[in-house]
Image (cartoon, rainbow, N blue to C red):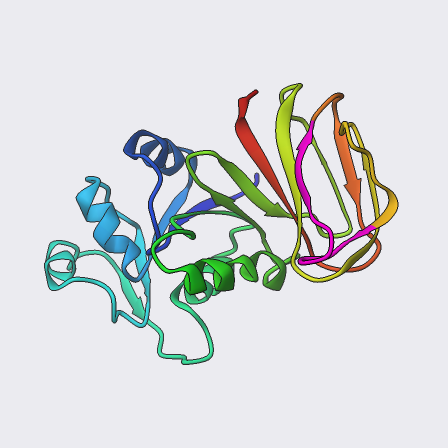
Amino acid sequence: MIKRALILANGEPPKKSLLHSLVRQAQLFVCADGGANTALKFGLKPDAIVGDMDSIHAETLSKFHHIPQHTIIDANSTDLEKAIAWTIKQKYEHITVAGAAGKRLDHTVGNLGVLAKFYPDAIVTFVDNVGELMFVGRELTFEAPLHSTVSLIPLTRCEGIMTKGLEFALENESLELGVREGTSNVVIANPVFVTVKKGNLLLYKLRDVR
């Protein structure tokens, strides 16, 4: 059985109904430091709080005093990285992260790197109100509603990209930020296949059908 965990980071949270749904789908609910403030605000109780504890409010600490708190002091990692690493140690293979974007742009950009950093130890997916962001690895197969939007986002220069099932097919092509991106492609057939020979490629799936 695949063990699924949810991590709530300290960025902009998704809407309450989506966050509650994500919690119900997970076997483990972890807050990354200040993400616990959001959990308290939304009436949710995490199974653990992980981080350096410099962003969590005193009221939150008081209300969640009975919840295990794992303080990790490491200037070379973010609270989200600490929470993901801790969750992987608990033997969770699939990790959904909410609240990874928003608030501070530097945090948002920095958080994108964790999708590649922890692969293949865990499959990490970022979720927001609009869609899901995931790491392609060397290949990725998925299904999505026809005519829905998919974007390919290169973290580094990506070479040898092949796609099948997308309107604007890539045939052994390259993507690179500032040179050529793969924003707003369209699903025309299922399943969708994406392969890449070199580089760190992200894929963002929008939930809404155009």
Q: Would you say 127 lies left or right of 122 here?
A: left
- Examine the rendered structure and indicate whether residue 25 appears above or below residue 92: above
- Examine the rendered structure and indicate whether residue 196 appears above or below residue 17: below
Residue nearest the viewer, comparing 17 with 157:
157
Q: Spot the residue most to the front.
A: 179
Q: Position of residue 135 (x, y in %)?
A: 64, 50
Magenta part of the chain: 174-186
- Examine the rendered structure and indicate whether residue 161 appears above or below residue 110: above
Q: Position of residue 87 (x, y in %)?
A: 45, 58
Quadrant (top left, top right, bottom left, bottom right) of the C terminus:
top right
Residue nearest the viewer, comparing 45 with 192:
192
Was residue 37 drawn as part of the magenta stretch in this picture? no
Q: Would you say 192 lies left or right of 147 here?
A: right
Name the residue at 81% across, 37% down: 163
Name the residue at 42% across, 52% down: 101
Q: Position of residue 129 (x, y in %)?
A: 41, 35
Residue nearest the viewer, comparing 149 with 133:
149
Q: Would you say 207 lies left or right of 168 here?
A: left
Quadrant (top left, top right, bottom left, bottom right) of the N terminus:
top right
Q: Would you say 191 lies left or right of 129 here?
A: right
Name the residue at 70% across, 62% down: 156
Was residue 180 drawn as part of the magenta stretch in this picture? yes
* Quarter of the figure with residue 80: bottom left
Name the residue at 52% across, 28% down: 207
